[in-house]
Amino acid sequence: MHSGFSHMLFNSFSLILFGPALERMLGSGKFLFVYLFSGIIANLATLLLEPLTYTHVGSSGAIFGLFGYYIAIIIFRKKMMSQQNAQIILILSAVSIIMTFLQPNINIIAHLFGLLGGLLLGAIPYFTKKDLSDSIHTTASWASSQRKNISFQSPVKVLIWAMIIILAILGFWK
């Protein structure tokens, strides 16, 4: 079910764009499990956290679960994806999350819990102490090297942009 053409278009576009590559990486069975599990988590979270009269439709939580699983791949299995593809996924995920808060009639709970469900499913194999520690150290060293490459012209400029983004989110929060 979808609430309108744009909702159906976004979900279909996302599934067609991101689904096949992830399905090739995981295999059909595991891909289906990730998709369904993320959708179920998203809908259960909505059921538990929203009033019983809250109406929601669509499979957006499952779509966000795919984004979450991709993010887990980027964090824990860097060699499975090129850096360029990882950047595309991260940017599209960030834009999708931001749009979740800016568009009216969006099930924010489903989007966030779907993303979290997919992320956790992708991270579960790396919850051993050594693998998780190695991944955290690798990610931290990568972030540290990226920080050295970024030079802000002014800390005031960064603060102004942060305030603009926060005010925009608060202004559209309903």
Image (tube, grey):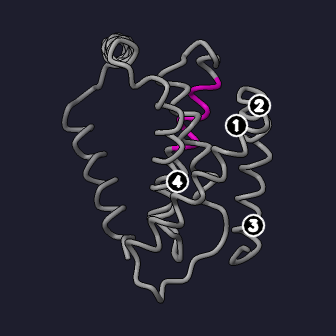
The answer to which of marks 4 and 1 sits earlier in the sequence is: 1
The residues bearing labels 3 and 2 have C-alpha atoms spaced at a distance of 25 Å
- Mark 2 and mark 1 in contact (Cβ < 8 Å)? yes
Q: Please provide the residue range marked out in magenta.
A: 85-93
Does the magenta-highlighted stretch encompass residue 15?
no
Q: Which residue is mark 4?
A: 114
- Closer to the observer: label 3 or label 2? 2
- Closer to the observer: label 4 or label 1? 1
Q: Position of residue 52 (x, y in %)?
A: 45, 85
Towards the viewer: 43 or 147: 43
Q: Is residue 45 above or below residue 70?
A: below
Q: Amino acid at mark 1?
A: Lys
Q: Which residue is mark 2?
A: 27
On screen, residue 90 versus residue 13, left or right, reads: left
- Closer to the observer: label 3 or label 4? 4
Within 10 Å of disc 4 (Cα), the crowding (few <14, some 14-19, many 20+) is: many
Q: Which residue is mark 1?
A: 30
The residues bearing labels 3 and 4 have C-alpha atoms spaced at a distance of 17 Å
- Element at badge 2? loop
Q: Amino acid at mark 2?
A: Gly
The answer to which of marks 3 and 1 sits earlier in the sequence is: 3
On screen, residue 48 versus residue 161, left or right, reads: right
Does the magenta-highlighted stretch encompass residue 88?
yes
Towards the viewer: 59 or 30: 30
Q: Is residue 54 above or below residue 157?
A: below
Dividing the image into 4 quarters, which one contains the C terminus? Answer: bottom left
The residues bearing labels 3 and 1 have C-alpha atoms spaced at a distance of 24 Å
- Element at badge 3? helix
Q: Amino acid at mark 3?
A: Met
The residues bearing labels 4 and 1 have C-alpha atoms spaced at a distance of 16 Å
Q: Which residue is mark 3?
A: 8
Q: Residue at x 52, y 69 (%)?
A: 103
